Image: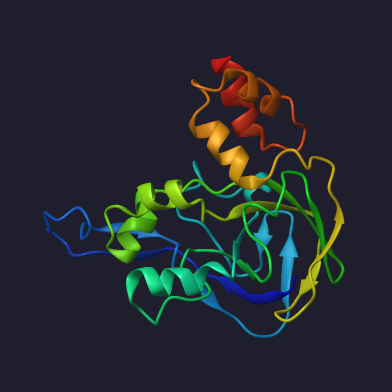
Amino acid sequence: MRLLSIQIGTPKVYGVPGSEDPMDRVFTSAIGKEPVGGRVWAAQLGLSGDAVADRQHHGGADQALLAYSADHYARWRKDWLREDVGPGAFGENLTVTDTDEDSVCLGDRWQVGPVAFEVSKPRTPCNTLARRHRRPDLVATVFANGRSGWYLRVRKEGWIEAGMPVTLTDRPYPQWPVRRVAQVMSERQQRPDEAALLAQCPALAEDWRYRLSREA
């Protein structure tokens, strides 16, 4: 694996004032992440210079950074017949090669230079992503194809830079690939036994463990 690109962004206003089209209504988001060059400081709560708009649903130690597979972008370009879809298009901080939701597992430990990351949960696509790309069906599409991305904790802070190798140093829960975790969470009413097992996984983000335990 290799860190292909690093993206940061701050909240901006999108949309057309007064529009009746749900895809054009005004909203504020930091989903517009842009690639940056040089070293970037990775701290417990995220990258230096990065921010979130909706602190109720984004940010925090369990969602310090969003990672996304670089390998997905060729598929999106083909699906959408567009050539302008690349790193940062899905609002991720880290675009990583040679990996995806089937090969990344909950609790995986990654080493990137001096920085240690840990996978905490899948990314849940929302309407903000759909509105950014003006595709009303994008949330359903991502749920169906599993190209969601995943969140990372920062276990050890430090400087990272695009081009660095990404090394898997530990895999304590190989039974929980990101795709399966997302599916079990989405279908928890139909898969109660798996949902109960997932709730017991210490690596799972606290908010998901709480939701699963309440609904058990």
* Residue 117 falls left or right of residue 20: right
**Residue 13 image-quadrant placement:** bottom left
* Nearest to the observer: residue 157 or residue 178: 178
Name the side, left or right, on which 180 lies relative to 156: left
Q: Quarter holding the N terminus? A: bottom right
Q: In the displayed structure, does residue 132 sit left or right of residue 213?
A: left
Q: Position of residue 159 (x, y in %)?
A: 79, 73
> What residue appears at the point 41 percent right and 74 percent down from the top-left corner?
77
Left or right of 19? Residue 136 is: right
Q: Is residue 68 above or below residue 183?
A: below
Above or below — where is 29 with respect to 74? Answer: above
**As displayed, is residue 190 above or below residue 173?**
above
From the top left corner, tell me how far across and down residue 26 is, in percent.
24, 58
Image coordinates of residue 169 in percent, x first then y, are 88, 57
Q: Residue at x 49, y 29 (%)?
A: 187
Q: Is residue 141 above or below residue 206?
A: below
